[in-house]
Image: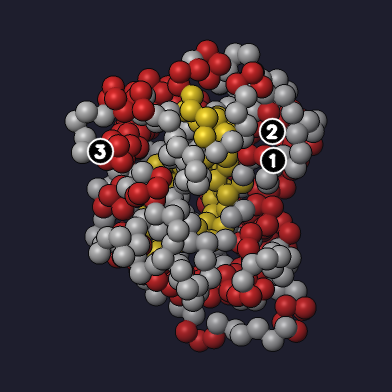
Amino acid sequence: MGRMSRRTFALAALSTLSTLFPAPAPAAAARGTTDPGPDRLPRAGAEMRGVWIATVLNRDWPSRPGLPASAQRKELISHLDRAVRGRLNTVILQVRPSADALWPSPYEPWSEYLTGTQGRHPGWDPLGTAVREAHARGLELHAWFNPYRIAHHTDLTRLAASHPARRHPDWVVRYGGRLHYNPGLPQVRAFVQQAMLDAVARYPVDAVHFDDYFYPYPVAGQTFDDDEAYDRYGGAFSGRAAWRRDNIDKLVRETAAGIKRVRPGTRFGISPFGVWRNASTDARGSDTRAGVETYDDLHADTRSWVRNHWIDYVVPQLYWHIGNAAADYAELAAWWSAVAKGTRTQLYLGEALYKAGAAGQPSAWRDPVELSRHLTLAARHPQVRGHVFFAARDLADDPIGAMARVVADHYREPATPPR
């Protein structure tokens, strides 16, 4: 009851705060961009309006490691307040970026992205503060975990002395210049769930969130060495790929069950790479020519997770522009809508805010209306229940006013997250 009353109060406050969000920059209008026009469809009163806050490598927050606790907290609050001003309703905060923790975990060390030294206490509780302050503003707080990534290097001795990977080097695979936990080991799967569910038990997070990293993305000329695990556990499967997919399926199903056990009512969502399989590989796939297919390369059968309702929501990362030759946003929005149709898994679309105005991107991303067109297009699919934007730093910078345009075109009134 307390959560609902705070949200009701915060939604009323949003009407006042709405004037604080900046309007599209005059320079954007001067570029002669095309208004989405009268085909813009009205949105439902309940929709996901989310933003990711990435902590890995200090991507979004904290702005650098080693800031005083007061400065870290101030920066975090700024991200939350900015989300409110933009009439967003959900923040997805990365709290376990690399087999570490942004809360006082009994299982894993404090993240180095806080203090600069893995295992060093930052002097405050970031996750506890984030949950409390988000809820006070009427925002949902989804705790974002990366299950298997350990480090962006291959030297175990650089990890904190107490790190589980140092105590269990047999759990570790070196691949692509990084350290990874081996998803094929049952003891690894049990441990990472235990570590993640500790946060769910401690804090009233609204959801548990995974991103797209399961088995690592392929690296040319390298082999993910899980021979020993496959020899021991893979005998019942038709091949290594089927065994690997089963390992990830088990992680998803067991995590979902653990969340329900530890904190009933907390949701479970996953944000996979946007292409399950190309139609040239599988007739059920999308009309795309993507170089990565989650089913085959990351061993993540994302389509089945939705169809079987193993997860409560899915946020495919549709980080392409409308008309992209290899992976058209319009095609993928339609494909995922068809996958979600008739299921109880809610569909939100992941949006590449970080590409808007960025150097080296296709010309479509230099148009501040591109993202707004995404929402206009998606509104034609009733299965699409909202959008999540990557990421918080880009929400703050908004170099060409793309997010300001989204707010002006689509977020004129507050909305509550879907239930």
Say left or right for 347 vs 73: left
Q: Nearer the viewer, residue 231 or 407?
A: 231
Q: Earlier in the sequence, mark 2 or mark 1?
A: 1
At numbered mark 3, what does the secondary structure look like: helix, strand or loop?
A: loop
Q: Nearer the viewer, residue 377 or 356?
A: 356
Q: Position of residue 359 (x, y in %)?
A: 71, 65
Say left or right for 336 vs 127: left
Residue flagged by tag 1: what amino acid is it? Asn
Task: Answer whether labels 2 and 1 touch (C-beta < 8 Å).
Answer: yes
Q: Quadrant of residue 124?
A: top right
In this view, the mark in front (2 or 3): 3
Q: Residue at x 50, y 72 (%)?
A: 324
Quick check: can you spot residue 55?
Answer: yes
Q: From this view, report whether residue 253 is shown above or below residue 394.
A: above
Q: Earlier in the sequence, mark 2 or mark 3?
A: 2
Q: Position of residue 93 (x, y in %)?
A: 58, 42
At numbered mark 2, what does the secondary structure look like: helix, strand or loop?
A: helix
The residue wearing badge 1 is 58
The residue wearing badge 3 is 239
